[in-house]
Image (spheres, rainbow, N blue to C red):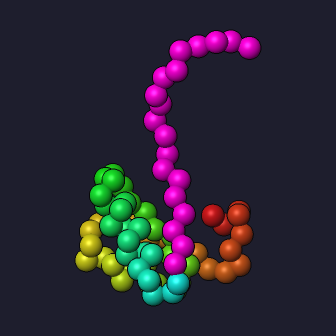
Amino acid sequence: MQIRKAERRKAKLRMGIAAPSGAGKTYGALLMAFGIGGRVGLIDTEHGSGDLYAHLGDYDVISLAAPYTVAKY
């Protein structure tokens, strides 16, 4: 065991978004991603709905079909 000084390090954002269908989860998540900055990517599991927000900015889309397994992600 070793005692050391605390130092702030880079951390990745971990966030869960839950809401009913049509509440704006994808739209809101994209706005937050654009606000944070950097490259934005979206995993589309709803048959092309990820392209509906292309007017918001430049982002990459990966389409994923069922069954949704950990290996696919």
Prevailing secondary structure class for the magenta stretch in the rendered image: loop
Q: Nearer the viewer, residue 41 or 8?
A: 8
* Quadrant holding the N terminus: top right
Q: Is residue 37 above or below residue 68?
A: above
Q: Which span is picked out in magenta?
A: 1-19
Residue at screen point 33% across, 67% down: 31
* Quarter of image, res 41: bottom left
Q: Is residue 25 above or below residue 12?
A: below
Residue at screen point 46% across, 35% down: 10
* Quadrant holding the C terminus: bottom right
Is residue 1 at least partly visible in the picture? yes
Is residue 63 at least partly visible in the picture? no
Lateral position of residue 15 relative to residue 69, left or right: left
Q: Residue 54 in the image: x percent, y percent?
A: 30, 76
Residue at screen point 71% across, 78% down: 67
Q: Residue 21 in the image: x percent, y percent?
A: 51, 86
Q: Residue 65 in the image: x percent, y percent?
A: 62, 80
How many numbered discs?
0
Lateral position of residue 2 relative to residue 50, left or right: right
Q: Is residue 13 above or below residue 52?
A: above
Q: Nearer the viewer, residue 20 or 31?
A: 20
Q: Is residue 34 above or below residue 55?
A: above
Lateral position of residue 63 relative to residue 24, left or right: right
